[in-house]
Amino acid sequence: MNYLITGITGFAGPHLANLLIQKKHNVYGLINCSNGRENDIRDVVRDDIFNSIRWVYSDLKNLRSLQIIFKENQFDGVFHLAAQSHPPTSFTDPLGTMETNVMGSANLIQCVSDLQPNCKLMFCSTSEVYGNIGMDGKKIKTNDTILPSNPYGSSKAATDLYMQERIVNKKINGFITRAFSHTGPRRGKNFSISSDAYQVARMMKNLQDKTLLIGNLETTRVVIDVRDTVNAYYLAMINDKCNGKIFNVCGDKPRKMQFFTDKLIEISGLKNVEQKIYDKFYRPIDIYYQHGDSSELVDLTNWKPEISIEQTLEDLLKYWLNKIN
């Protein structure tokens, strides 16, 4: 099978490429331009896997260049992961977030619909589309109200709804995933758990004093490993029963964010680490409790998270130690 990954140089994209190539599929990676950015994923992608990726170049906002890719290549499936995915950044640049996430996605959907109607498209939405509707502690279901609380969530909700309409009107063949919190190697240090891991790694290298700058650790999330998340994407892609569906991708152990910070410090072996609140790490509007119902995904694909959160955090810390080196 030939699969195209948009956002392959992001967080989840390289892990998905690893999985697909290990499953003997052909992987095409879409990036904006050929300026050496391809090599950026080598921190989590082995050399033999990297060398088997076929690169194609286009800005998703440029419909004509995107059309050329779909005229010159044939895909069995597209994993659309590309996005401006950082909620705090979306507050500072809401228009840029909308342009990238909404218009870029609309262009991709149009290309698949017009040029490769038999190609299956996975749109990577997000749990952020639900906003704070799970704050009473209930499990969020895919038919619950969409009520995003930041511009990033709004941009994803707009495309989520557009994708639903295209599916209902038989203009596109595919499905939607709404991934809840996930982390692991390659997670950007502008995201909460990875920020902690980055700072802790610097402390272990004596590059930073033992003051850990933190955000709001009272919020509650279910956090799983990115490698389990992309496995859910893959299992849904290869299962025809998943066509037209919307899936939450979520584990089943809600924890306060404080747990992940404390666990990282414990894994590091560091003593006497002071945790200090840093205002810039706070969102203007935060999501206080979030737990998703993934039962339909589990029922159709037998997916479940396999990697323990302790292993995930250990791998994340090792990643930053290697990256700093």
Image (cartoon, rainbow, N blue to C red):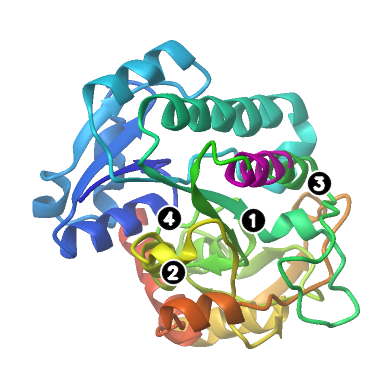
Q: What residue do we see at 76% from left, 63% from top? A: 215
Residue occupied by mark 3: 150
Tag 3 near tag 1, CB within 8 Å: no
Helix, strand or loop for disc 1: strand
Numbered label attached to residue 232: 2
Q: Earlier in the sequence, mark 2 or mark 3?
A: 3
Is there a contact, CB below 8 Å, between mark 1 and mark 4?
A: no
Q: Under tag 3, what secondary structure?
A: loop
Tell me which segment is drawn in magenta: 158-168
Q: Position of residue 167 (x, y in %)?
A: 58, 45
Of badges 4 and 2, nearer the viewer stands 2
Q: Quadrant of residue 90?
A: top right
The tag earlier along the polypeptide, 3 or 4, is 4
**Quadrant location of the C terminus?**
bottom left
Q: CA distance from mark 2 to mark 3?
A: 26 Å
Q: Earlier in the sequence, mark 1 or mark 4?
A: 4
Q: Which residue is mark 4?
A: 12
Left or right of residue 109, residue 146 in this image = right
Percent of width and height locating residue 297: 53, 75
Question: Was residue 161 drawn as part of the magenta stretch in this picture?
Answer: yes
Q: Secondary structure at mark 4?
A: helix
| Cα–Cα span, label 3 and label 1 | 12 Å
Q: Residue at x 13, y 60 (%)?
A: 24
SS category of the residue bearing label 2? helix
The amino acid type found where label 4 is placed reads: Ala
Q: Which one is in front, 312 or 222?
A: 222
Q: Which mark identifies residue 126?
A: 1
